[in-house]
Amino acid sequence: MERNQMHKHIFLMRQSFFDQGLLDEQFIQLEELQDDANPNFVEEVVTLYYRDSSRTLLNIEQSLEKNPLDFNKLDNYMHQFKGSSTSIGAKKVKAECTQFREYCRAGNGEGCMRTFQQLKKEYAILKKKLETYFQQTRQAGPSETACRPRMN
Amino acid sequence: MEYLHSDVAVHTQQREKLQHFHVLAVDDSLIERKLLERLLRESSCKVTCVDSGDKALEYLGLLDSQEIDRSTASSSSPQSSTQEGLKAVNLIMTDYSMPGMSGYDLLKRVKGSLWKDIPVVVMSSENVPSRISMCMEEGAEEFLLKPVQLSDLKKQLQPHLLKLPVHPKIDITTSNDNGNDSMIIDITMNNNQNVVVSKRKTMTPEPLERRPQMKGLAVI
């Protein structure tokens, strides 16, 4: 694919993340911290997020198998996970976290489990999309415009 | 009154000063630490990250075991960095919700210690008014909502620039509406670390003060 076309494709891909509500303003904050001295900052943070949070998700998974459910513990884990998700701008994932915590506070185990399944789905979708995005960005190389296209 | 800054000169000065500004960042989350470190480095600060309140206390030499050692020795000035080779810390930024010792607990410990004059900023992803007032009452410098952004930090670090031992000198040129008189306001630090503000008139009017006349709209 011709280079300009690749960049356009990546630009549209990125735009779709915002349009579809997968990412929010916080992601742009990360992009703004990327520069010549920190050229892969966004990818580094996202990679760290997926590595670090998988442990928390496992903890939640295991806690959901217990009987009776320890809602306090679940809420604490989710608070952690929500924090990280917020830090990378994972909008949809964050929304599921909020929902999950509401169910925790209501002591609704069914709700928690349902929400958790949805959360894992969104988490995985975002992961795949961002992996593709970073990979293609690397392949396309530096673009003519500054590396931070603004969201308008 | 109109204030004009020499933006580039001030900005450069500020960045130089902040290179000596050491922030101790406390957060149990790896991602938050990475983010905070990047934000603080972007603001030209020196950063040390620790992952718990206990580690923070250890860094400050405030762990019970360390304090006992010190109380048997003669006391020295807490502010100076010469306290047994401990590094000077200009600001502590701590997450509120941490396992074990919370940010609030850490705040209390610091404020009840020889390091009580170090400003402590508490951060939280949850906007809980009672939590905020509790921290402020305990002496927190500020309470920031996460995710912390660069603009929050810049606002936070701004006032600390005037307290550093290097001599800051910021010229602010003012003019009144007539554009005839002009004053220069000098903000400097005297030997007692007090900020001194003085005004002086310039000899000749600054060219920038003569604003172009607004041309009236032509009537067709």
Image (cartoon, coloured by chain):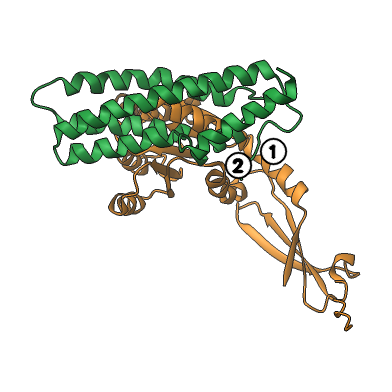
Chain colours: A green, B orange
**Quarter of the picture holding the N terminus of chain A:** top right
Where residue B155 appears, x then y in whole percent? Answer: 56, 49
Q: Chain of mark 2?
A: A
User: Is the residue marked by circle 2 packed among few (<14), some (14-19), or many (20+) residues within 10 Å?
Assistant: few
Where residue B30 appears, x then y in whole percent? Answer: 42, 24
**Quarter of the picture holding the C terminus of chain A:** top right
* Residue B40 appears in the rendering: no
Name which residue lies at 57% across and 35% down.
A15
Tell me the element at label 1: helix
Residue B84 or residue B109, whichever sits in front: B109
Name which residue lies at 63% across and 25% down.
A38
Q: Amino acid at mark 1?
A: Glu
Answer with left or right where residue A115 lies relative to residue B9: left
Residue B143 or residue B186, whichever sits in front: B143
**Residue B187 numbered mark, or none:** none
* Residue A29 appears in the rendering: yes
Query: What is the quadrant of residue B6 in the picture?
Result: bottom right
Q: Amino acid at mark 2?
A: Met
Tell me the element at label 2: loop
Name which residue lies at 18% across and 23% down.
A64
Residue B112, compared with residue B6, is above or below; it is above
**Residue A151 numbered mark, or none:** 2
Answer with left or right where residue A74 lies relative to residue A7: left
Where residue A67 appears, x then y in whole percent? Answer: 9, 23
The nearer-to-camera label among 1 and 2 is: 2
User: Is the residue marked by circle 1 packed among few (<14), some (14-19), or many (20+) residues within 10 Å?
Assistant: some
Residue A59 or residue B88, whichever sits in front: A59
The residue where tag 1 is placed is: B16
Residue B20, compared with residue B141, is above or below; it is above
Question: How far, Cα to Cα, is label 1 from label 2?
Answer: 32 Å
Residue B82 or residue B93, whichever sits in front: B93
Q: Chain of mark 1?
A: B
